[in-house]
Amino acid sequence: MSTPPLVVGFDLDMTLIDTVPGFAATLTALGEELGVRFPVADLTAQLGPPLETLLADHLAPEQVGPAGDRFRELYPDLAVAPVPLLPGAREAVDAVRRHGGRVVVVTGKFPRNAQLHVDHLRLDVDHLEGWVWGVGKADVLRREGATMFVGDHRHDVEGALAAGVLSVSVLTGGCSREELVAAGTHVVLPDLVAFPGWLEEHLAGRGRARGAGIGWRRVGPPP
């Protein structure tokens, strides 16, 4: 049986990039415009769900949609420049390239703003798909022929499992190891720094857990 081509899907926020400073700056500016004191620290710790979901507990229902639109208008000027790559992100993408693979970014972020981050940080990405979340990511992963999906949130795990691909989780977002394991992830890494070493071993042995010293462990049987 031939081995399928390597296609790695990555989530964006808190997987490849540290969205916190940009999100916080934009949310603060939005609150000043609306006269609302958003709990910025609490909301930045919950990054993952759609923006409107995060705003819903703090605004009247009729305000949520317009506030989300205004947030996305403010975002390019306030949130792109201060947002860095997370440690190991560029090396993770380079590792996929080194093995002849394609890189697909699948994110819940507004597509234009997601592309601004990718362009600003010069990430070598073959395809970016925005405004998809949770199990909705499965359609994109299947269409692009992904063999695994790397994310930081339990909803990223749900998307990978719904697509029938390997779920690789990193602990750089708002979900704990326990939450990710409970969601059904196959592999937990501390961050993307560990990804190139894990990928090397995964491709060599299709997931056999050799050399656990790099800081990862398989948490379930191979899919």
Image: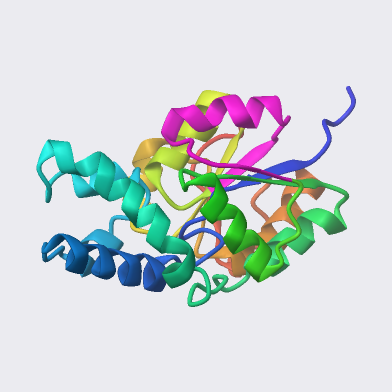
Does any portion of residue 176 appear in the rendered image? no
Lateral position of residue 136 relative to residue 192, left or right: left
Name which residue lies at 12% across and 47% down: 59
Q: Which residues are magenta?
A: 127-150
Asked whether 144 falls inside the magenta stretch, the response is yes
Q: Position of residue 121 (x, y in %)?
A: 65, 69
Give the colour scheme of this rendering.
Answer: rainbow
Reply above or below: 88 against 73: below
Residue at left 47%, top 48%? Answer: 109
Quarter of the image that includes the C terminus:
top right
Q: Does residue 144 sit above or below 102 in this rendering?
A: above
Q: Is residue 45 magenta?
A: no
Q: Residue at x 49, y 45 (%)?
A: 219
147 vs 16, nearest the viewer:
16
Residue 192 lies left or right of residue 71; in this view the side is: right
Along the viewing direction, whichever of 83 and 90 lies nearer the viewer: 83
